Image (spheres, grey):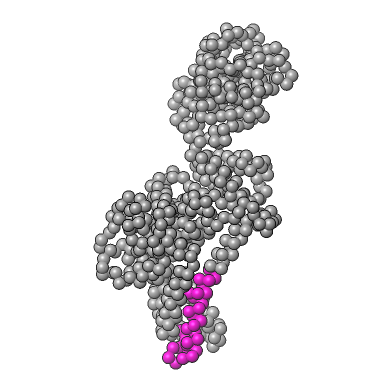
């Protein structure tokens, strides 16, 4: 027994203008769309070792794999059609009416109809028709070919094989199916290239055989062959016992019994195919030869672009099998809003990403309030492309508001990126306290301003009825650049300066605010990935106990705050009491809780 260099269980099938590959933990479909661009859809599947034990038993695993492959293959085929066959942006009136009236796309209806017709056609051609022709012969020569006898099933099997071969030959008349057979060839060549130990390049793949031992065409031939043997034995043993005296009823009973035996046929055929695929020996070549001959019909030599599809799909499956973190991907197609939202939330939950981010992406992209996302509508391909781009970037862990480039804070637009922290809703409590404390002619200083969100929001609010001067300070040049941009964007009257806390500050202020770094150094590594890996460490690290900046502020604030002035600090949920101890020399202090009842703001009067 001779094995290939890199034997793999990855298999696949041709789809419309593309290739689907399926591994142990993932499947990927790559399709060339109407613009000539490659689109990929990749999703996770349950690996065999994680299926219930009974599903892994000999023969039963064949039925399970057959059903899963059939369902997955049909889904990939139908999904590829949605990408490859795209309607014009100016939809026909009927399509628009269906989308608005029934909240479904015409492609959804066509997919459902095609699935039903496909099943009916398969049963009709390969089950009903052979039995019908054999019944005619049996009725014409009942003595030579008794109904449900051994010869009856042998002849019926012969009809089934002839119809199968004729069906394949007829498909060759279709230009689109001949193209699909080219993609089938690309799939086989790519797998053979990998199993032969060659790098997956277009040139290497082109030089490999387009025949493969685990081909679905070979499997179908084995199914035909096994069904002839099994049905013949069944007819010989029980055929005479199911005669009712009514020809039509006999026909139906036999048909139903064959349907019942199909899972057994599939199970045995799967084990035979699996065994033959592992044996590379001239002795078994006669058993493989019929499948190879049929593959000569169902595969064609692919061009370079087709091979690119197959390589991309294969490499994605390899990556998914090797790396549990390899991201899933989705085709850019017209789809229903509920379906898109469900998919995004599911995958966000799997990645420990707030599911609400899916709603924000849909709401902001479609310009629909989050409260109205429950109302079904069709998302166009153009809209879907933008949504999926944002969704896939969010899956990398990059915070949502960095992706959008801005967020809303106290009703004002604040631009943000990796140079500054993203303003949190909890910080709005600090702004409310600051606005309430300021009077006409007061001066305010915002330390560790970052994006400038606090200074901008306070300045814009008090400007409505009070004349207040606002200064914002930060040590980071990058943060100051963002802060100045937000000052200009909101037309806020804020003076932005570079200063390490009070280092470059001049004068005294009635109000000083700060949302300083307060995360303990050792705890930064335990933060959520989107905070730990993307938000600036300079704005997070508060020293060994998280209180370093509060001590530094306490040490120098007396020089910069007027008598009776107010200091408002944001803090971590368990830090308020420690901060009060640091400022124990002050006249008065109080703690303000956030909406969840946690200590959030400390107010100190000097």
Residue furthest to the bottom in view is: 143
Please state the horizontal and vertical placement of residue 80, each as a whole percent of the image.
51, 56
Decide which of 70, 234 is in the foreground and name it: 70
Circle count: 0
Q: Is residue 61 magenta?
A: no
Residue furthest to the right in view is: 465
Please state the horizontal and vertical placement of residue 254, each as a whole percent of the image.
50, 79
Q: Quadrant of residue 111?
A: bottom right
The residue positioned 58% from the left and 29% from the top of the image is 415
The residue positioned 59% from the left and 64% from the top of the image is 113
Q: Main secondary structure of the magenta part?
A: helix
Residue 43 appears in the figure: no
Residue 173 appears in the figure: yes
Q: Is residue 130 magenta?
A: yes
Please state the horizontal and vertical placement of residue 602, each as a whole percent of the image.
60, 19
Decide which of 477, 509 is in the foreground and name it: 477
Q: Quadrant of residue 245?
A: bottom right
Which quarter of the rendering shows the C terminus? top right
Which quarter of the rendering shows the N terminus? bottom left
Q: Quadrant of residue 159?
A: bottom left
Residue 211 located left or right of residue 250:
left
Residue 104 located left or right of residue 240:
right
The residue positioned 55% from the left and 64% from the top of the image is 115
Instruction: Indicate whether 405 appears above or below 104.
Output: above
Instruction: Indicate whether 409 appears above or below 42.
Output: above
Please state the horizontal and vertical placement of residue 208, each as a whole percent of the image.
33, 58
Instruction: Indicate whether 261 appears above or below 48.
Output: below
Decide which of 583, 307 is in the foreground and name it: 307
* Magenta span of residues: 119-148
The residue positioned 51% from the left and 43% from the top of the image is 392
């Amino acid at each position: 027994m001779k094995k290939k260099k890199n034997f793999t269980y990855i298999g696949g099938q041709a789809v419309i203008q593309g290739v689907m590959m399926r591994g142990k933990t993932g499947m990927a479909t790559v399709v060339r769309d109407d613009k000539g661009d490659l689109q990929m859809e990749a999703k996770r599947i349950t690996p065999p070792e994680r299926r219930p034990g009974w599903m892994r038993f000999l023969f039963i695993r064949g039925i399970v794999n057959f059903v899963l492959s059939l369902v997955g293959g049909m889904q990939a085929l139908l999904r590829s059609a949605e990408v490859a066959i795209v309607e014009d942006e100016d939809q026909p009136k009927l399509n628009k009416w269906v989308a608005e009236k029934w909240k479904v796309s015409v492609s959804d209806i066509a997919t459902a109809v095609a699935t039903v017709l496909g099943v009916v056609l398969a049963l009709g051609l390969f089950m009903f028709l052979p039995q019908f022709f054999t019944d005619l012969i049996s009725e014409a020569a009942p003595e030579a070919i008794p109904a449900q006898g051994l010869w009856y099933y042998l002849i019926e099997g012969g009809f089934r094989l002839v119809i199968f071969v004729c069906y394949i030959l007829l498909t060759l008349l279709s230009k689109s199916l001949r193209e699909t057979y080219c993609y089938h060839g690309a799939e086989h060549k790519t797998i053979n290239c990998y199993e032969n130990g060659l790098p997956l390049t277009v040139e290497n793949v082109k030089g490999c055989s387009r025949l493969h031992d685990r081909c679905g065409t070979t499997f179908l031939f084995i199914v035909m062959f096994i069904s002839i043997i099994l049905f013949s034995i069944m007819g010989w043993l029980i055929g005479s016992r199911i005669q009712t005296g009514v020809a039509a009823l006999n026909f139906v009973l036999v048909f139903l019994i064959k349907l019942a035996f199909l899972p057994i046929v599939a199970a045995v055929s799967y084990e035979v195919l699996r065994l033959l695929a592992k044996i590379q020996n001239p002795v078994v070549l006669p058993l493989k030869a019929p499948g190879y001959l049929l593959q000569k019909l169902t595969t064609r030599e692919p061009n370079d672009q087709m091979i690119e599809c197959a390589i991309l799909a294969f490499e994605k499956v390899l990556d998914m099998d090797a790396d549990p973190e390899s991201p899933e991907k989705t085709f850019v197609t017209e789809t229903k809003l509920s379906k898109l939202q469900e998919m995004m939330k599911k995958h966000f939950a799997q990645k420990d990403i707030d599911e609400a981010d899916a709603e924000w992406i849909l709401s902001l992209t479609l310009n629909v309030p989050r409260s109205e996302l429950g109302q079904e509508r069709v998302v166009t391909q153009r809209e879907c492309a933008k949504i999926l781009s944002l969704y896939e970037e969010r899956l990398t862990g990059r915070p949502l508001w960095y992706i959008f480039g801005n967020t809303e804070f106290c009703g004002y637009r604040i631009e943000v990126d990796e140079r500054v922290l993203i303003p949190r809703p909890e910080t709005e409590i600090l702004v409310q306290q600051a606005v309430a404390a300021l009077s006409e002619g007061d001066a305010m200083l915002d330390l560790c301003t970052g994006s400038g969100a606090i200074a901008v929001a306070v300045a814009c609010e008090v400007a409505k009825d009070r004349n207040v001067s606002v200064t914002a300070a930060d040590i980071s040049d990058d943060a100051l650049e963002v802060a100045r941009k937000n000052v200009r964007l909101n037309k806020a009257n804020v003076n932005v300066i570079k200063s390490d806390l009070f280092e470059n500050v001049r004068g005294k202020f009635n109000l000083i605010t700060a949302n300083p770094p307060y995360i303990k150094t050792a705890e930064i590594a335990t933060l959520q990935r989107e905070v730990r890996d993307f938000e600036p460490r300079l704005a997070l690290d508060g020293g060994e106990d998280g209180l370093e900046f509060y001590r530094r502020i306490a040490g120098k604030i007396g020089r910069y705050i007027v008598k009776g002035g107010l200091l408002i600090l944001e803090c971590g949920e368990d830090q308020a009491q420690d901060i009060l101890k640091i400022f124990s020399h002050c006249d008065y202090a109080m703690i303000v809780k956030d909406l969840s009842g946690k200590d959030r703001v400390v107010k100190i009067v000097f």
